[in-house]
Image (cartoon, rainbow, N blue to C red):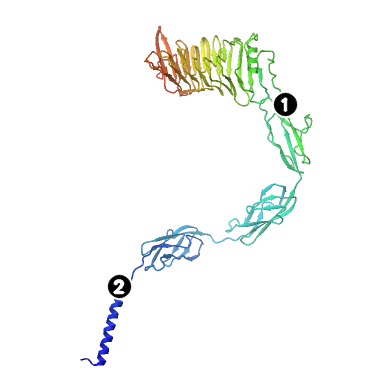
Amino acid sequence: MLKPYFLKLYIWAMAICCATILLTSCEDDKETIPVSDVSFDDPALLLIEGQKQILKAIITPVNATNKNVTWQSEDDAVATVNASGEIEAKSVGKTIITVTTDDGNKTAICEITVQKPIASVSGISMNKTNLPLLVGEKETLVAIITPEDATFKNVTWESSNDAVATVNESGEVEAISIGTAIITVTTVDGGKTATCDVTVDASQFTVKFESNGGSEIEDVVVRKGELLAAPTNPVMEGGLSEGLYLGVVDPNVGSFTFEGWYTEETLENKYDFNTPITNDLTLYAKWIGDTPEPVDVEAATGNNILEKSYNYLNTLSLATSTEYTLVLANNISNPALQGNFKNANVSLLLIGKGEERVISKSNQGNLFVFEAGTFIIGDKIKITGTGFGNFYPLSLQGTANAILKEGAKISDIKGTTANAGAVLVNSSDATFTMEGGEICNNVVERAAANIASGAVCISWGKFYMKGGIISGNIVKTNFNTHNIAGAVYINNWNQFHKTGGVISGNSAVITAVEDGKGKTGQQVFYSANNNNTSTWKKVDDDLGQNDNLSTDNVSNPLWKSVQ
């Protein structure tokens, strides 16, 4: 049996052993806390060459077990970083500093920008030291900082009297009322200042320009005592009024030349632009040159200039061929032209002044029918019509000639029984020439005639296409025996010569259910009689500028035989 002394020692030893075992067990079971993220307070830093700065990585969570990290610079030539996160700026440029956690391989980046050592502002000035303004005027002052490479160029602006003139953060000065004010600009770096004296004056005068038929010139406000700058010269948009003129004239080109500005309506004293302005002023334009006088057609029958001119020329006795120009400055609806035009010695150019002028017809019957002479449809003229039956906008008979010029249109016509949507040539001695312009979007429906086209029908005669465009025209018929063309129909023995222009997007449709002898050409159809034997040629594909085509050469591969 142990003595009491040894028994106590034994009990203490056993207690110590148990405690050690328990403590060791607890150490083994302690939880490891992983890193979830790493970041920087500032993802971008601006450093000066030679500057050093500690970049601190923020580990999340704060009680993570392993907070060890590694550092790396994308470009050591710009900035380096050591194992403690200390950055040293080496040279001007940009680089990325990356920190990576040992635990979890989490990363964060910081963009480092390195600049030259700071250049301090040494002075400031303004582009103006004196600024005269009128009430309500605005002008921006420019601050000029020295040296040019100063690092911090921020400035503040201030007016000594906001009641007279205000200034905003961009240096824009606005004159509020009559008086004086001093505008001060101050650099944030160094507090350098510069000033501009602003004088606000209400003495100003208005100069008006009376162009006397020329283009409008806007009024000008001039400060008292200053010189008036000469404005851009006005332009006379043709000195021609609406009417019939002998010869070929162009209403869109001025017949007058601007000579200068004068101080009175009588145009006696020419204005001197070296004279200081001391009062309100009106200046008057002087023009030199003559314009032709229009032919007097008032005695001719008609309700408008087109009717009067047509009827006048049709009855005029001429020994030789004579050219006329009819200038239209207004639209004309349903003109009542008396009879067919038969004056072989007249060449008539129809031209619009200013904007496009429209001649339209909305009742049944023909519009222009020429048996002789030459009819030229010129710039800014559009011929159109809708909602009627057998209608020919332009019908050429006898020895008549017609020419379509650039800028002219025969378009948006709708007829129901016509041979042609736009032009019918119906005489072996008649000729239609297309030098430019448009024949577009005309529609012929039901086409009771056994030959028809959406645009030009050469029943008898000649068609020369040298330019322009024929597009979007449509012809439809429910007669299963008829021959039709979307754009151009040429009847037997007649002539078609294409040396330019475009024929595209036209269509010919026979809607009859029963089979018949009717044939279609979507763009062109040619009925060619050879030794009294009918053959047919067609063009279904679009024809471009360089796709030349002629009835003299039916072997051209552009022609396709009609089965």
Work out whether mark 2 precedes mark 1 in sequence or the reverse, and give the earlier one.
2
Q: Amino acid at mark 1?
A: Ile
Tell me which corner region of the image, top left, top right, bottom left or bottom right, holds residue 290: top right
The answer to whether residue 229 of the structure is visible from this angle is no
Which x, y percent locates residue 19?
A: 29, 80
Q: Nearer the viewer, mark 2 or mark 1?
A: 2
Question: The N terminus lies in which quarter of the figure?
Answer: bottom left
Q: Residues within 10 Å of mark 1 (few under 14, many from 20)?
A: few
The answer to whether residue 217 of the structure is visible from this angle is yes
Q: Which residue is mark 1?
A: 288
- Left or right of 297: which side holds 104? left
Image height check: is 492 above or below 466?
above
- Left or right of 89: which side holds 201? right
* Picture disc at residue 544: none
Q: Which residue is mark 2?
A: 28
90 or 534: nearer the viewer:
534
Q: Residue at x 69, y 34 (%)?
A: 217
